[in-house]
Amino acid sequence: MNISNGARRVVAAPTLSDELLRRFDAPGPRYTSYPTADRFVEAFDAQDACAALRQRAEGRPGGATAPLSVYVHIPFCESVCYYCACNKVITRHHERAAEYLLALDQEIELAFGLLGSAQPVSQLHFGGGSPTFLSDAELQRVVSSLRRHLDIGERTEVSIEVDPRTVSAERLAHCRRLGFNRISFGVQDFDAQVQKAVHRVQPFEDVRQLMIAARELGFESINADLIYGLPKQTPESFARTVAQIGELRPDRIALYAYAHLPQRFKPQRRILADDLPSASQRVAMLGGAIAGFLSRGYSYIGMDHFALPDDPLAVAKRQGRLHRNFQGYSTQPDCDLIGLGVSAIGKVGTTYYQNAKTLPEYYDALQGGQLPVQRGIALNRDDVLRRAVIMALMCQGRVEFEDIELAHLVRMREYFAPELERLKPMAEAGLVELEPSAIQVTATGWYIVRAVAMVFDRALQTDQQRERFSRII
């Protein structure tokens, strides 16, 4: 967890000018998948998901079975954070968890009845909502249900998202006893005015004590989530938060841009647009945060992640083994993902699926003995090819034409001639380098690698409703 005791090397962050921002900052996906979840269709239903699970259980012709990752969504929160765009249920009635856990048990039985027992799993992640809304006994119940079907080994990454307002050192110890070895704290910002403006008050000292406890309990990795672009934030105030996070020294940092979409997410209507920082202030926050974390010895993983140099994520970045999934950047190779819980997304082979987004629909499906899958998509050859290119850009910042051509039997310069033409202005702006046999994202281009990836997104080429996505900066 500790970095070398030697002097820290200060690395200057590349700069993104206001002119470049105006040219290339646009709404677009974060590419935790391709095609993105907004492209899922209801024509893909529970029967299609069952077929994909059976195919995995039977083994894919001519190839090894992909590693397995499992995501469990706990939707409940005691209070609403105004910025939040997650699928959540706000309630102080903890007894509501009982019905949900019963349904979750049913989904686990159905899914793993198709997949088979004793499935080795490389990654297990609890997200939300707030997983720590559950009591200690309820958390233990869910983990026990999963262990009946999963082979969770010593090397399995078992992670949980934690709301610092809902846990104590004793609760963290319980999580550790259950087998959680990675933990993520939702911090967002330490400034008191900002916390009040987003309805999430959690003093720095409280988070500091929890992180100390997590280290003492032996969690292998500690992550902190931050958001820039929140109401009342300024470059100066956010610089103080960056310094405080640097003092806490988490192994990983996830830095997200706030997307103000009140027409889609009702809690955001409580945020006054006049309180939001300007575009130039957001750029200053991002640039300042990157410079601040680099100067404190962190490695810039890409887009929204930082890690200490000896963290597996930083090692994977240096070795070209970085991947991206629905939880963001990951060291895990391309996994099949089983999504459990309301709104959870799964990926099996060349299919994606998503569960019902409301509790009544989720409960109804399971009471009828069906997986609660509401929509999804089966990828075609073009989707698989574009996914490979987009993920290479997002993870390695480089696309080797020969690798893509051999894997997908295409000629890159012919197949992607229009896309390569659209990259030329980015090359002229110094965001990418167009080599004879590769595309290379530059240091400055990493600021807006999403914009580079968007060039290869077929759906966006004719999309007239991009405003449903967050902006890049």
Image (cartoon, grey):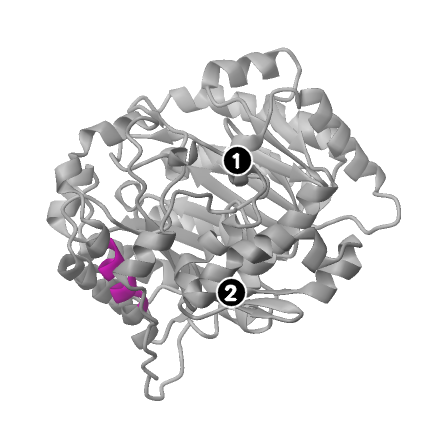
Residue 225 seen by the camera: no
Question: Which quadrant would the N terminus be assigned to in this image?
Answer: bottom left
Dot 2: what SS? helix
Q: Quadrant of residue 33?
A: top right
Q: Nearer the viewer, residue 252 or 300?
A: 300
Indicate the amino acid at tag 1: Thr
Q: Which residue is drawn at 19% across and 37% down?
A: 199
Q: Nearer the viewer, residue 205 or 18?
A: 18
Q: Residue at x 83, y 43 (%)?
A: 60
* Badge nearest the viewer, 1 or 2: 1
Q: In this view, does 458 lie to the left or right of 290?
A: right
Q: Could you tell me residue 180's position as x and y percent? A: 49, 51
Q: Is residue 264 left or right of residue 446?
A: left
Q: What residue span does the magenta drawing correspond to?
A: 282-290
Provide the major secondary structure of the magenta segment.
helix
Dot 1: what SS? loop
Indicate the amino acid at tag 2: Leu
Would you call the spot at circle 2 few (<14 residues within 10 Å), some (14-19), or many (20 or more)?
many
Which disc is residue 123 wearing?
none
Q: Could you tell me residue 143's position as x and y percent? A: 55, 39
Which disc is residue 313 wearing?
2
Q: Could you tell me residue 470's position as x and y percent? A: 37, 41
Residue 154 seen by the camera: yes
Taking the magenta stretch, the answer to whether it contains residue 288 is: yes
Q: Name the residue under label 1.
A: 462
